[in-house]
Amino acid sequence: MPDVTTASPVHRLEIRVDPPYLVHVGTGLLSSLAELVGTAVAAPSGICVVTDDAVAPHHAEAVRATLEALGTPVHLCVVPAGERTKRLQNYGDLLEALADARIDRGGLVVALGGGVVGDLTGFAAATYMRGVAYVQVPTTLLAMVDSSVGGKTGINLPAGKNLVGAFWQPRAVVADVSTLETLPAAVRRQGGVELFKAGLLGDPRLVRAFGTDMDFGLVVDRGGGELAALIARGVAVKAAVVAADPLEHGVRATLNLGHTIGHALESLSDHALPHGDAVAYGLLAAAEVGAARGLVDWRPHARRLLRWLDPGPLPTTTATALLERVARDKKQVGARRRFVLLQEIGEPIVVDDVSDGEITRAWQALEAVTR
Ligand SMILES: NC(=O)c1ccc[n+]([C@@H]2O[C@H](COP(=O)([O-])OP(=O)(O)OC[C@H]3O[C@@H](n4cnc5c(N)ncnc54)[C@H](O)[C@@H]3O)[C@@H](O)[C@H]2O)c1
Ligand SMILES: [Zn+2]
């Protein structure tokens, strides 16, 4: 809900888990970071800010200086940018850096960056001294609407993505939309896919904001307050799902809309296809399966998303190889294939009876659309 006491509205959303925490979304929030952090974590004994070497030049010093107002030493730990950093080696190095910085059980870790920094730092915070407080300061659109909220943390193994992790909720999330100004356009568009997914899952008005009045590019490239309002809508969708199912026993699986086929395509392309591109294809595949079942036909939305995104090419593969890759996904339960469909826009359902034939037809439709 907008905070009427400031000129540029700050949206504050409560994540109702135990203990609950706030997500603050607005422009220029980094300047009030100390205050927001200080409210969430009383008198930390020491602070370590973790960021990556692409984010550090823009924001690290300012964040460090601001947090010094809390009257405790602030250390900075900079990891290399990129998905490869989500691995055991960097995780171990980070734990040692926390120990070197003499962070104790009363200390605070701050994750300043995209989903990579957030996942790695959150996992280190979850396990260092059996758990210390951390705050997420997301600097990518994806991290703001998705990864910084909900407490899923983790790293990759050579055998696969996110194979090691923990549920560990942050004490607060501070999303300063101004930080997105330095984000490469391609990374920003990837995040736009997750924002759109949030609308499909729980906010038809957010889907319409992408659709009727203006095209996708205008939405995602909008600056400041308007984008903050849309991000807050996306966060609200995630907040509701996380509160209903913090440990992903049920409804949280709906966040995987578009990801069943998306992950398989990402992996079949050997990660040449960026995550957002793969998910955008996955969304169209899910829309195809749903439409063939007589559920709401949201293929026009998914096709429009693809036209705007102009994704990398579909991997050259076959329906059989795709089916095999889907079966390997760790999120698949036993022999059943879990799939998220939409009954209506904003009303997801999880089904486990999608047949090989249905996936094959969805694959053929994807090929036809991109030919
Ligand atoms: N925990 C969850 O619930 C969850 C959900 C979705 C995704 N994820 C994870 O998130 C990761 C992807 O996150 P991402 O897309 O944010 O990628 P990322 O963290 O790699 O960031 C993308 C790139 O943008 C750079 N960058 C970040 N902020 C910047 C800024 N403000 N200005 C300039 N450059 C900036 C980064 O250095 C990086 O090079 C994946 O590892 C994925 O598994 C986690
Ligand atoms: Zn995703």
Image: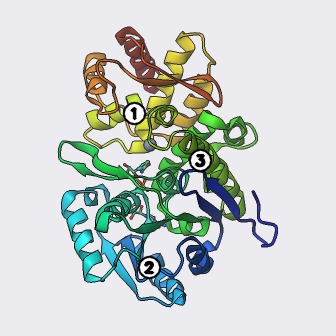
x%, y% of residue 186? Answer: 46, 53
Residue 218 seen from this side: no
For label 2, the residue is 60
Point out the tag, 1 or 2, that comes first from the N-terminus.
Answer: 2
Q: In this view of the protein, which residue sits in the foreground, 4 or 197? A: 4
The image's colouring method is: rainbow
x%, y% of residue 13? Answer: 66, 56
Q: Residues within 10 Å of mark 3 (few under 14, many from 20)?
A: many
For label 3, the residue is 239
Q: Is residue 235 left or right of residue 170?
A: right
Circles 1 and 2, Cβ within 8 Å, touching? The answer is: no
Residue 287 seen from this side: yes
Q: Is residue 258 left or right of residue 82?
A: right
Q: In this view of the protein, which residue sits in the foreground, 41 or 336? A: 41
For label 1, the residue is 262
Q: Amino acid at mark 1?
A: Gly
Q: Secondary structure at mark 1?
A: helix
Q: Reply above or below: 233 against 4.
A: above
Q: Amino acid at mark 3?
A: Ala
Q: Residues within 10 Å of mark 1 (few under 14, many from 20)?
A: many
Q: Amino acid at mark 2?
A: Ala
Q: Is residue 29 left or right of residue 252?
A: right
Mark 2–mark 3 distance (CA, rounded to whole Å): 28 Å
